Structures are given as C-alpha cells and as structure tokens.
Amino acid sequence: MINTPIQPVVPLPPVPPVGEKTIKEKLVALSEKFKTLSKNMKFLVIAGGVLVVLLILLTIVSLARGGRKQQVVKATPTPVAVASSPIPKYEIVNPSKYATDSGVLKIEGDVDSLNSEMNSVDLRSSDLRIPDLDMSIKF
C-alpha cells in the first residue's frame, strides 16, 4: 500500500451565480436609489413601510390571541296568538270539457290504481335480502 498524506478539505466560499447580485449589493443599490428620491417620496415610502410592518404585527398578535371569538346570541321567538282562518274550499265553477271525457277518466283511474299498487309493495321483504353466510366452515 502506498501511504499518501491526507489533505484537509477546505470548503470554497459561496459564489453567487453570474449576473445575480448579492443581498448586500442589492441593499446598497436600494439605499442609493432612496437617496435620490424627493422628500415627499421618501416620506411616502417610509410611511408605507411602517404601515406594512404594523399590519404584519397586528396579524401576528391577533393570531397569537386565538382570534376574536364572537358570542352567539340565541334568539327565542315570542309566542303570538294568531287567529286561524278556515281553509277556503275551492269549488269548480266552470269545469273543463275534459273533466267528463271517458279517455281522461280512464287515465285517472289507471294512475290511481298504479299509485295504490306502488304503495302496497313491501320493499323490506325477506326474499330481497342477502342470505346469511355460515362462517364456521371446517375442512
């Protein structure tokens, strides 16, 4: 075996990709741009920044407190005596010419008999259920 000395590995400093600025360079460029603004614009930028920071702080505080819990007020209705009026009975004053037609009366009778047949069908009948399975099978 050949004895080769082990050299320590020194990590290289991070190099930003070509064409991209570091954060420090971006901050310097931003401060230079801020210096060229007029007094009114500087005031508006600072006021906007303060408002954004306050909004973020208020959001964090409200989330930390668990939000504002509203109390639920249950409304109970007050009973009021209402005079009940009788249901008016409607009388057919002028019956249709089809009211006494034999074909219409036959269809009405067929529909009534079909309704009575449908209401008399037992949907819970035992022959419609799945049979019970015997789970104790031995070989």
Image: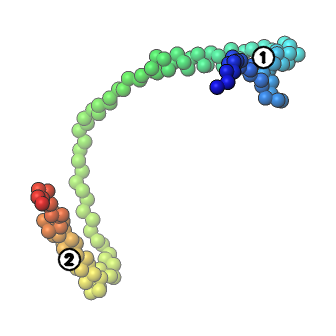
Quarter of the figure that contains the N terminus = top right
Which residue is more in the foreground, 15 or 19? 15
Is 128 rendered above or below residue 84?
below
Measured from the top left, where is residue 32 in percent x and y?
86, 15
**Residue 24 numbered mark, or none:** 1
Can residue 51 be seen here?
A: no
CB under 8 Å between discs 1 and 2? no
Measured from the top left, where is residue 29 in percent x and y?
84, 19
Which residue is more in the foreground, 56 or 94? 56
Looking at the rendered structure, the kind of residue marked 1 is Lys
Which image quadrant for residue 136?
bottom left
Q: Residues within 10 Å of mark 2 (few under 14, many from 20)?
A: few
Q: Which residue is mark 2?
A: 113
Which image quadrant for residue 118?
bottom left
Residue at 69%, 21% (x, y): give it. 4
Report how far apart the C-alphas of labels 1 and 2 lie in the structure: 90 Å
Residue at 22%, 79% (x, y): give it. 109
Does residue 25 appear left or right of residue 54 in this picture? right
Element under disc 2: helix
Measured from the top left, where is residue 22 in percent x and y?
78, 21
Residue at 72%, 15% (x, y): give it. 47
Q: How many marks?
A: 2
Residue at 74%, 14% (x, y): give it. 46
Element under disc 1: helix
